[in-house]
Amino acid sequence: TQLLEQSPQFLSIQEGENLTVYCNSSSVFSSLQWYRQEPGEGPVLLVTVVTGGEVKKLKRLTFQFGDARKDSSLHITAAQPGDTGLYLCAGTGGGADGLTFGKGTHLIIQP
Amino acid sequence: DAGITQSPRYKITETGRQVTLMCHQTWSHSYMFWYRQDLGHGLRLIYYSAAADITDKGEVPDGYVVSRSKTENFPLTLESATRSQTSVYFCASSGKYYNEQFFGPGTRLTVL
């Protein structure tokens, strides 16, 4: 069974600070995704990374896939209250299976 | 409207009753999935379907039944609901490739 460990589980910081969320596994994933979920809603896809070492940017969010495709990170620069939410990493090991999700990072950005 | 919808959004039922959660997508995606989300466990895959009439078990399939007679619909049935099935259920669809999934708004189910 593939597992994804996310850290930290909870993070509360002030507006304008930078932060990094980590997603680690002992398994190799063919692709890895980051989702953001707000209360009462379903997860919304932010990005997909496929190639080892790949870096993708989405405005103030930077996503990196580890060289061995076993881990990923999400870095937010100058966090804003609108970034508040649950951030989930999810991986695909191949085949027609669904996604394996980490348990998420609850992020609160205080004004 | 295009997208993925779930119904009902909220459901309260009693132990032992049969409950069916509905999921409908308008993208004609081949793949559809059911997950449950619980505190401490995150999102876990219940069942998935690669196409009409093709379904397979996920991580936590016990107590659930699915069917997929049409590409756009993927209902999830709890044959005899138990309290441990109290959860938020999410349906998702994917065009596969990198398995990028699009989620519905969820159904919050409470089993008394």
Image (spheres, coloured by chain):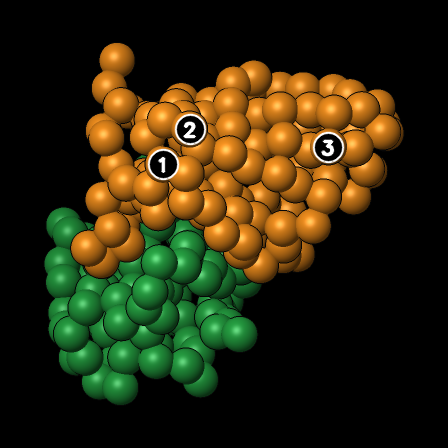
Chain colours: A green, B orange
Left/right of residue A100 with respect to residue B112 in the rendered view: left
Residue at (41, 81) in percent of width and height = A27
Q: Are marks 1 and 2 in contact (CB under 8 Å)?
A: yes
Tag shown at residue A78: none
Q: Position of residue A28 (x, y in %)?
A: 34, 80
Q: Of the residues tagged 3 and 1, which is closer to the observer? A: 1
- Tell me the distance, in whole angstroms, between the alpha carbons under discs 3 and 1: 21 Å
- Camera sees residue A37: no
- Above or below for A23 versus A110: below
What is the chain letter for disc 2? B
Task: From the image, tell me which residue sits under label 2.
Answer: B69
Q: What type is the residue that disc 2 sits on?
A: Ser
Mark 2 falls on what kind of element? loop
Residue at (73, 32) in percent of width and height = B79
Task: From the image, tell me which residue sits under label 3.
Answer: B79
Name the residue at the top extreme.
Answer: B1
Q: Residues within 10 Å of mark 2 (few under 14, many from 20)?
A: few
Q: What type is the residue that disc 3 sits on?
A: Glu
In the foreground, B53 or A47: B53
- Tell me the distance, in whole angstroms, between the alpha carbons under discs 1 and 2: 6 Å
- Above or below for A70 versus B74: below
- Between disc 3 and disc 2, whose residue precedes? 2
Can marks 3 and 2 be said to lie on one chain?
Answer: yes
Tag shown at residue B52: 1
Q: Of the residues tagged 3 and 2, which is closer to the observer? A: 2
In the foreground, A98 or B18: B18
Q: Position of residue A71 (x, y in %)?
A: 34, 77
Residue at (25, 51) in percent of width and height = B96
